[in-house]
Amino acid sequence: MANIPIWPGSSSFSPGDTPFGFYDYDYQFQSDADKFAKFAAQRLGYPLVEIELQDINFYTALEDAVTTYGNELYAYQVADNLLSFQGNPTTIEPGNNELVQENLSNVVLLSNQYGTEAGVGGTVTYHTGSIILQHRVQNYDMNEWAISQSIQGRIEIRRIFYEAPPAITRYFDPYAGTGTGMMQMLDSFGWGSYSPAINFMLMPMNYDLQKIQAIELNDQIRKSQYTFELVNNQLRIFPIPTGLKYMRFEYIILDEKNNPYVDRNGRNIVTNASNVPYNNPNYTRINSIGRSWIFEYSLALVKEMLGYVRGKYSNIPIPGSEVTLNQSDLIAAATSEKTALIERLRLYFDTTSRKALLEKKAAEGEAQQKTINYVPMNIFIG
């Protein structure tokens, strides 16, 4: 008869007895490892039947179950908080025992793209350039200018600084001392002998604004307006230049604008669910609800292992006959129990997600409001 190792009935856990050693130095795991081995063996029929497993098999099942529990738990944590994690360094404190708060980092990142289009900020660098306006030359090819500056890729002109001189620089033209009644006011104060183009009167701010608006309106009506037309980076300016001078503009490089990757200067950052900083769970901190699930899942793993072992020794000869072991029953039961336990755990996490809790709070608020509506309202007559 084959020499099959049998569970001796007791065990003594030591660090290094599990394959990965994730929890070997956790004092609570050390204590529960031997207790679970006894629990699982007795659930499988020991000492009425022999259990063809050793202590390390029980320890392996317990370690696997704790890790599976942590993976399921943190998968839900990542799903709830991925937007808050993305863009942060992967070297931040692991989130196992941290309360994660929502932030607007990704919302701001999205709004930055609109800021780029609106010209009020964003994530794309605005470059500056200038061209020399030639005498009597009205049209300028900005693509040719980009090539002459050795700029790689296409550019997009975002702003052109081609404006008339500010009205404030021409404040006294053509209004200095004429038609405003100022000379009469100066005479009344004894200042009439001073130069007529100088005003010593303290005037209100709206007076200056009206003067500036009058100068600008004069330019619009009587003069050729300073403006431009830009089509496919072909620039046409008005009025036609009459001399040599520089015109400045701002532009962006389209390859930089269309680049989908965020520049983080080579830092390792959280980009997806695979690199969110979560470690294996701290077994000591897992509450009784979690440990109960872990023990049940560990028992299912032990059943599976025992089924595979008994499959190797499916028929054991005995005097005058042979014994057929229950390999298929154990594997079928283990598979069914593992599936049911995973589904139960995920359902539990679904009901405790941020979305589910907020919906529950909203429903509670509505129910409370309906209840309050049935309370009689006192009528006060004063």
Image: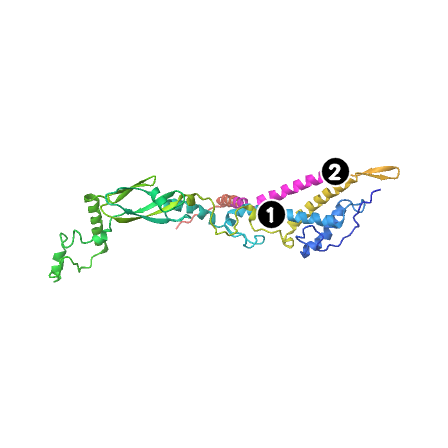
Q: In the image, what residue type sits under mark 2?
A: Asp
Q: Position of residue 128 (x, y in %)?
A: 35, 49
From this view, report whether residue 108 is shown above or below residue 185. Answer: above
Q: Position of residue 220 (x, y in %)?
A: 22, 44
Q: Is residue 27 magenta?
A: no
Q: CA distance from mark 2 to mark 1?
A: 30 Å
On the rendered image, what quadrant is the N terminus found in? top right
Examine the rendering and report whether any part of residue 331 can be seen: yes
In this figure, which residue is indicated by the disc labeled 1?
Answer: 73
From this view, report whether residue 331 is shown above or below residue 215. Answer: above
Examine the rendering and report whether any part of residue 104 can be seen: no
In this figure, which residue is indicated by the disc labeled 2?
Answer: 329
Choose top left, top right, bottom left or bottom right for residue 202.
Answer: bottom left
Nearest to the observer: residue 350 or residue 359? 350
Q: Is residue 339 magenta?
A: yes
Which callout, 2 or 1, points at the residue further toward the start of the chain? 1
Asked if residue 82 lies left or right of residue 111, the reply is right
Q: Position of residue 299 (x, y in %)?
A: 71, 45
From this view, report whether residue 237 is shown above or below residue 88. Answer: above
Q: Secondary structure at mark 1?
A: helix
Q: Determine the residue located farthest toward the bottom in the rendered image.
A: 190
- The residue sitting at 56% across, 48% down in the picture is 275
Q: What's drawn in magenta, residue-wise?
A: 332-361
Q: Position of residue 28 (x, y in %)?
A: 68, 55
Q: Determine the residue located farthest toward the right in the rendered image.
A: 320
